[in-house]
Amino acid sequence: MTTELRRLRNYIDGEFREAADGRTIDVVNPATGDVYATSPLSGQEDVDAAMAAAAAAFPAWRDTTPAERQKALLKIADAFEERAEELIAAESENTGKPLGLTRTEELPPMVDQIRFFAGAARLLEGRSAGEYMEGLTSIVRREPVGVCAQVAPWNYPMMMAVWKFAPALAAGNTVVLKPSDTTPASTVLMAEIIGSIVPKGVFNVVCGDRDTGRAMVEHPVPAMASITGSVRAGMQVAESAAKDVKRVHLELGGKAPVVVFDDTDIAKAVEDISVAGFFNAGQDCTAATRVLVQESIHDEFVTALAKAAQDTKTGQPDDEDVLYGPLNNANQLKQVSGFIDRLPAHAKVEAGGQQVGDKGYFYAPTVVSGLKQDDEIIQNEVFGPVITVQSFTDEAQALEWANGVEYALASSVWTKDHARAMRMSKNLDFGCVWINTHIPLVAEMPHGGFKKSGYGKDLSAYGFEDYTRIKHVMTSIEG
């Protein structure tokens, strides 16, 4: 006896559709390693259809008032709350995430972020109108850019989708969104909810692989391409978009330094940093996974952090005692394991360092010490539940090492010295600096990095403005 797999479908022009050529991808639950659904492997014909639908819907959606768009987004937020358990279940099956933490740590911020952008739709700021040349009045218009091609990642499928569609729709754009090929289920459910509220063609979902995403970015219709993903993927998108001077919004990798000075409350820092490093199995561009500790407290800190790792539990989604679930897919498990397997002889695994169980893609909470600045695991993003520790001598060395990577998304400083905290926050070359905390995000503040972590902002009024264009209008006032 076989169980029939669930069939996920694209959402294009207000209806669910199979891929035009019927191709599909198996979707695996990472907590079990079992296939539970199939998803469309969309090709050029599907992308063409979605882009045509979004382009056709754009003029009418663009011309709605901010109040009308706000009303629609508020309805979406309410509907997400009403169908929360369905969304949570889909996301957990997508990713293996703990049900309880998805319920408390992901769904509420998502709903709040949608409501924030609903309000932002009615509060676009701009320079005042004025006469900057005699007899002429100038005004500045902020307008939607048009159709937006958006590619979401697998680490936070629902939340990253919200970060993309909410500001885009609020600004008056239409959307074609592609979820990761490993995590399409919750996005397809979101399409059902959103599609019941906005006009057909305003929000479209196309499932598929990298080739599907490439076809979206290369398509002539979108005015903007937005991706959250790896540095390599971001580079490919930027190169492709350059061919027709398409606007690009990139949120890429991270290698967040966590700089701990010797006046820090070690117990409190270890507690917070371990959670910020291991949450979501470390599959977070801002995760606290690269810790730099002042040498006078290094040994004590490492001992405490290793103990925290040993006390941290990973396991099945319905286990209320776990902090995180599995890695997202078999390739990611191989990548994380590879970093540990290739550690240099001078490195020491203080805790973890191995796969957990023989079912699913679970990896133990891991702490590695004794590392040097040019080690592979320091320079490259692991994207797993692995925290590295380096020992520094003084503030200058800490700053040099913290900035000494190609990523520049997020960072944190741990000290009771206010002046030192201000100096470090000024000189750390990262888009976000937390002081005596790590990883909290709010809808009102921008999220985005520098260097190879990309450009453009998510969240906040800045993230909203990224989905608008500026037009100067000048008129004669002399009749």
Image (spheres, rainbow, N blue to C red):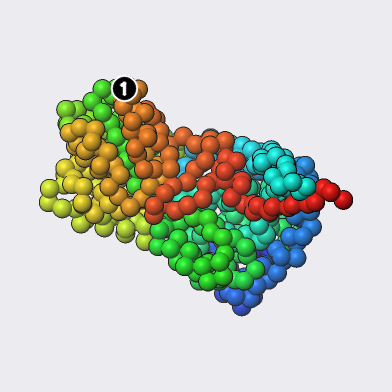
The residue at the point 28 percent across, 31 percent down is 260
Give residue 278's quadrant in the image.
top left
Q: Amino acid at mark 1?
A: Asp
Q: Is residue 210 above or below residue 266?
A: below
Residue 442: give x, y in percent of width and height: 53, 35
Residue 234: give x, y in percent of width and height: 45, 60
Using the image as rendered, state which of residue 352 and residue 420 is in the foreground.
420
Using the image as rendered, state which of residue 250 and residue 426 is in the foreground.
426
The residue at the point 58 percent across, 74 percent down is 43
Using the image as rendered, state which of residue 26 and residue 450 is in the foreground.
450
Residue 307: give x, y in percent of width and height: 25, 32
The residue where tag 1 is placed is 417
On the rendered structure, is 411 left or right of 457?
Answer: left
On the rendered structure, is 233 left or right of 91?
Answer: left
- Residue 362 in view: no
Mark 1 secondary-structure assignment: loop
In the displayed image of the protein, which residue is found farthest to the front?
Answer: 134
The residue at the point 30 percent across, 44 percent down is 403
Using the image as rendered, state which of residue 443 and residue 59 is in the foreground.
59
